[in-house]
Amino acid sequence: MSTRLFGEPVRRREDRRLLTGRGRYVDDLGPDALAAAFVRSPHARARIRDIDVSAALDVEGLVAVYTWEDLPERVGRPLPLLIPHPALTHGRTAYPLARDVVRHVGEPVVMVVAADRYLAEDACALIHVDYEPLKPVVGLEEAAHGARLVHDDVPGNVGARLLQEVPGRDGRSAREAIEEAPHTLAFRLDIERSASMPLEGRGVHARWDGTDLRVHSSTQTSTSVRMAVAAALGLPLPHVEVIAPDVGGGFGVKIVHPWPEEILVPWAAMTLGREVKWTEDRREHFVSSAHERAQVQYVRVGFDDDGRVLGLDVTILHDHGAYTPYGIIVPIITSTQLLGPYKIGAYRVEFSSIYTNTVQVTPYRGAGRPQGVFCMERTMDKIARHLGKDRTEVRRANFIEPDEFPYDQGMIFQDGRPLVYDSGDYPRMLAMLKELIGWDAFERRPGRGIGVGCYVEGTGVGPYEGGHVQVTSDGRVHVSTGLTSQGQGHETVFAQIAASELGVPIERISVVTGDTRRFGYAVGTFASRAAVMSGNAIALACRKVRAKALRIAADALEADPADLEITDGTVHVVGTPSASIPLATVAVLANPLRYAFDEEAARATQFAGASAPDRPPVAEGDEPGLEGRDYYSPIRSTFAAGMHAAIVETDPLTAEVRVVRYAVIHDCGRLVNPMIVEGQIHGGVAQGVGGALYERMVYDGDGQLLNASFMDFLMPYATEIPRIETGHLETPSPLNPLGVKGAGEAGVIPVSAVIASAVEDAEGFPVDRMPISPSELFDLRRRHATG
Amino acid sequence: MEHEITLVVNGAARRARVPGRRLLSDCLRHDLGLTGTHVGCEHGVCGCCTVLLDGEPVRSCLTLAVTVDGREITTVEGLAGPDGLSPVQRAFEECHALQCGFCTPGFLCTVTALLRDNPAPAEDEVLDGISGNLCRCTGYQNIVKAVHRAADLLAEERAPSAGEPPRDGEAS
């Protein structure tokens, strides 16, 4: 059937415009808008003594200069703390423009508005800010020592401390279980900073018409930007619209909001009565958006002769940078998702989330999971090495078995709900992976190693998403959902879902995302949640529309709705194709009319006999139009899973690491579009390889980011990424109508663990710090050669 | 001081008044309204802003507009022919070689020139040919696949009688 598109590798419907230069990204809008630019702090920690803007005032084309003191009280307030948590006892957020102090290089201090960006930057260069530089707090351990403070009122630089303990089945604590275990190991692990680094930076365009404010932002959540902007500017919500147009990648960083610029640019547009636009440049993105990953982990583990973990005790230092607008979501995810596909006897995890004078840390694809998986998978490898066992055998011994779902890990997850896995088949997944990579036949030799890594990813977190589906009188179907798109192919997969649910050819379906004019209620795009949340909401909305269409068609055809089906956009009686009515006509009949504006509409007018004269034209409880709206709000997250393996070769002289093969087995429940899922996996793995071998944020002792450019922050090109071999396992989620689990973040999660495992195998010594550069591997070789 | 320049963009002469410091990328995007050319790093590393200057790929973010007065420029808007998408564009669509689409115009221009100079590149020649363009979404695998596919499509176009029948709208 032509409309059974769920599960098919349908080509993307967004590609045509993107291939021909007709995409619309924020900077493509508002050709006549004024340009904003920012003076940003060159110091990691300083007091602002004075700001002298006088020299800038003569710049031709200058329109306005604003410091914090120029902002109205409401606009100048600290930015919201988006995700409060009881453990975040010392949450701090920045002012939209710095007030008296700056706490990281890149913090905005002055906003300039001018005729174009060149002139705005000319003016920025002439503004003199008199700083009193202070010695900054840089580096996790130095910060945790607390000798100097990032915020004067945050003792020890500790923003949050959270302990979760899960006793073993015998009631013993993790520490007791470890003390009494036949074998114990203790070690330290380090992961450095990386960042989402979408190729399009942030951007905001605002237009005020005297009553209504329209904002375009390169964001992962237009609905929440709207609420934040309305609150900050004191506007009633119906007078603010926010649209995420085409967005050039997000990967997490664009879920943060409202950015200072998302408040300041609309405020300037209102104040000046002119369109204003700000487009982030690459250096700004490095020093003033957000990073992720950096953690130090102290691990103690106790296990038996088979490698079964009896007790695990992890203490995490998490660097959250200068501010905590996104709360402590990243370390919460690390500490809960660390458990992966395993049954751990008893678990104790405690993290301290620490302030440093660096760019804030908020979720980047994987969102704390890569760190947690690195910890658990390094632990599994160390256990195997200690016992002289195969690494996959130790993992197998610890797996949750397929008949143990739903499996309660006994913790509280990032959504505030119990960490209960919905479904999965980990032993089968491992068997598939070993087969795909040829694990058992692998011939190890010096300089050639194989590695493995497993993960479970809580996906599709709530609270909800919605979908609206409207069939217009031309038979076209208009689908909208509030969450946003950054390249995931939502226009395609949501159209596939609608086509399958409604029985309409996909060519007649259009999808709009992230536009509050079309759908005002949404949470946003993150945590691999779009297919689960909006996918199911759209399916439910389609089911409402379908039921209404069948009811109206049944009236028109004098048939029983139960005998009707919709095929190719036509409602017909099953087994009697001639008794049919096009969905377009049903849409006409669904809206009783007084005026006939075209021939189709005439069928629904009051003298056309479409409705019975003894009943109201719109029945009680009904609504005009063939449209439906529904929401999907799950009781808790779904849990996707995956296992990766890699073969690496290390150069004996240069210590360069080359990934020779990379294999992925992936389970995201039912696949909506396998082509798109594979694309998501490829991209995730590539970011993982970048994080494992190349990418890091290099801060010096003064808090300067030394590699804030694409010349020095090494993102992989095509030449660095191996061919990725994939296999799929589909264990449907029992939690939602479509049985899907979400796939966006998955690929990146275990890669550092997998590469570390393979390099360790090739070199014969532990690899406990990632990323690993050739010079670091060279140093490790020297250290281990000399003992 | 502003300069009057004429650029032949996608086959049409376009005039603009630009200051000497105006980048070609900004001139194309903001003076001529051709926003298909994207700017990802402003320092010549990512390749998003790649356009063809007299047929050769250049970084428009490292080129001053005044220095290319009178020259021919092809941007992503000029790649499709009267019959629709170019073979390179079609191959990218078929192979799912784009996700967010921001780097795509640069890749399309780069690959168009690559396949003109080397109609049947080997795998390492493809990798080498696109090794100046960053993509953060796809992991490159489908881009590499698309380059090979585009080479096949171009070969079919050159020899319609030997391979596929001519497509609709094509003179036979």
Image (cartoon, rainbow, N blue to C red):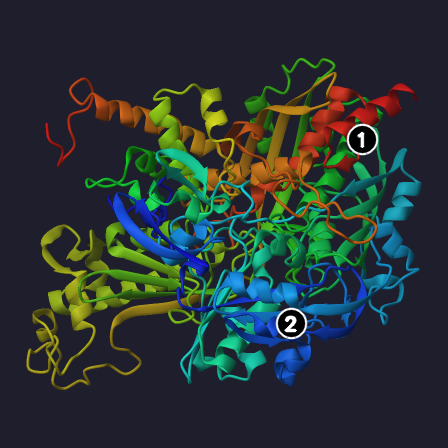
Mark 2 burial class by Cα count in 10 Å: few <14, some 14-19, many 20+: few
Q: Chain of mark 2?
A: A
Instruction: Report x, y in % for residue A336.
Output: 71, 51
Residue B16 vs residue A193: left or right?
left
Residue B85 vs residue A398: left or right?
left
* Residue A339 showing in the rendered view: no
Residue A364 vs residue A561: left or right?
right
Front: mark 1 or 2: 2
Residue with the mark numbered 1: A382
Give the total number of marks visible in the rendering.
2
Residue plotted at (39% across, 51% down): B28
Residues tagged 1 and 2 counted as in contact (Cβ below 8 A):
no
Q: Nearer the viewer, residue A195 or A125?
A: A125
Report the amino acid beneath label 1. Answer: Lys
Q: Is residue A372 above or below residue A581?
A: above
* Quarter of the image that includes the N terminus of chain A: top left
- Asked if both marks, 1 and 2, belong to the same chain, the answer given is yes
Instruction: Report x, y in % for residue A519.
Output: 41, 69
Q: Is residue A82 above or below residue A615?
A: above
Residue A311 vs residue B106: left or right?
right
* Residue B1 showing in the rendered view: yes
Residue with the mark numbered 2: A55
Instruction: Report x, y in % for residue B139.
Output: 52, 36
Residue plotted at (63% across, 26% down): A646
Q: Chain of mark 1?
A: A
Q: Nearer the viewer, residue A2 or A697?
A: A697
